Every structure is written in structure tokens, then in C-alpha cells.
Image: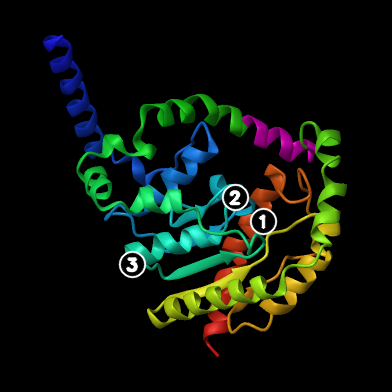
Amino acid sequence: MKKSIIIGLSLFVIYNVALYIVKPWHQKTMYPYWVLENYGKAQRYTRPDIHPKWVLCGSSLTAGMDHYLPDSVHSLAMTGGSFFTGIEVMNKTDKIPPVIGIETNMLLRLPDVYITDDALNPIMLQLRNYIPGIAVYNQPFSFVAYALLGSVEKENQIRFSKENKILNQPLYDEQIPAKIIEYNVPYDSALLAEHIQYMEDQLKGYEAKGSRVFIYEAPMNPALYYSVRMRTLRAHLRKLPFLFVEVPLYHNWKTADGEHKTPSDCATYTYWMMNTVPQMLDAYYAK
């Protein structure tokens, strides 16, 4: 038993030394499950040597773009969540990047306190800095997932890009009518106003610290884009004192379920954002 413990501790020490040498947290990571991905993104952002030029906060509609983002962009987009989680992580680390993008589609979702409490726990935060092997993004299963799933993901992207379609399209199409009904039920006006005001206050605070901020609406199925909820939300967002990046409508955006872009369109939208928004920001802040 004693020998096994010594061997286990020795391997753990060697593994952590290797992590310090390689510093894999500066590279993209693929997780075997989206919950781990959410925790990993938040934990990784708290590292003292991570200083992205851009941060994107949002939901799974933005998380689908992660694979295509340049290394200078850190995604705090949370699958099943909203931009509020990313805002909480930035606020509590006080690490405010030069450019912040906020996806507004899932505005009424609250922050995930489980993720923020885990990432910002003062004891675990320090331990992850000194013992990187305990962080989600440094777990062996994440590296195995990247090795096994990475090639599959790339293969799928090539196939989707060529065929311009997704697997099980009829199955996904069945979800759209229900979403259309949901999206045409008006938002609670008081709750919507509260969340917009909170977002406005936070973004003004970031601007006061020197950040350039923009809000953007991720592409959706046309029936959802023109729904009661999205038209109401869009009308409020246009009144805010920030650059509002609207969906480029000249492209026929395709989605898997009405909300989530197909892989090929995730790539297309990411490329458009990375090459268009910097110029829009320059023009907006030159006023």
C-alpha cells in the first residue's frame, strides 16, 4: 500500500511538472461533456498568465464558435447558460480585457453560481495555480477527449461544410415549431428591463476601465429572429449606448434546431465577426 501511494504521488508530481513545462492551458481544449467545458472555461480564465485581448460572454449559441476563434479570444460562453456567468467571472477576478463582446440572445438566463463559486473559490483558485493538474482543463480525460474527438470534430466540420447540412435534420426540424410558439410569448417586461439595466451598468463599468464593448445577436432561424421576443429585445438593445452588432441578413443562416448554428455557419459567423467587428469598434469609439 505504501509503495502504491509513493508511486501515485510521484506520478502526480511528474504530471504537474510536465504541465508547467508544456502550459497546455494556452491551447484550445476539447472536453468530453459540456458541463466540464463550462467549468474549464471559467477556471482557465482565472489563471494569472491568461490575458486575452477579447472575451466573448454568452450562451451555447456563442460556445459553438469556440473551435474557430483565434487564440487571442477567450470564450466565457456557457452552454445552457448566458453572458451573466462570464460577467461574474470577469468581475470577481477583476481581469477586464481590452474588448468584451456580449451575446444577448439568452438575456433572461441567470448566472450559474455553481460555476462561479467553483472557479473563484479562493482556496481552489490558489491550488489550481500551484497544482495545475487538479484543474478541469488539465485533466487527462480532457487531453484524451481532444485526441479522440478532435479528429472526429474536424471530419464532421469538413463534411458539414461541403454538404451544407447536418445529421438528423428531420429530427431537429421537429423542434422548431415548438420554439416558434415559445418565442412568440412576450417577455416579462419588468424582468427584461431589470436584466438590460444590469447589463448596461456592467458594460459602462468596463468602459470606464478602458475596455471597448459591443453587444451582438447570434444568428437564428428566421422565424425566431422575427419573433415577438426577439423584436422586442432588439428594440431595447438599439437604444443602449453601445455598439450593437446585428445579424448580417444577407447570409441564409442555417441552424440545427432553430437556435444553434450548423458547424459550417458557426465558422462563417466567427470569421465575419473577427474581421468586421474590429472595424466597427474603431468607427464607434472614434466618435
Q: On the picture, is 240 further left or further right than 111? A: right
How far apart, in angstroms, are the residues tagged by discs 1 and 3? 29 Å
Foreground mark, 2 or 3?
A: 3
Q: Secondary structure at mark 2?
A: loop
How far apart, in angstroms, are the residues tagged by discs 2 and 3? 25 Å
Q: Quadrant of the C terminus?
A: bottom right
Magenta span includes 162: yes
Q: Secondary structure at mark 1?
A: helix
Image marks 2 and 1: residues in contact by CB distance under 8 Å: yes
Foreground residue among 170 and 88: 88
Extreme residue toward the bottom, this view: 287
For disc 1, the marked residue is: 269
In the rendered view, tell whether residue 233 sits above or below residue 111.
below
Where residue 94 is drawn, which disc sits there?
3
For disc 2, the marked residue is: 65
What count of labels does the image hold? 3
Position of residue 229 measured from the top left corner of the image (x, y, whole percent): 78, 66
For marks 1 and 3 on the same chain, the one whose residue lies earlier in the sequence: 3
**Amino acid, disc 1:** Tyr
Specify start and end residues of the magenta stretch as a single range.
155-165
**Amino acid, disc 3:** Asp
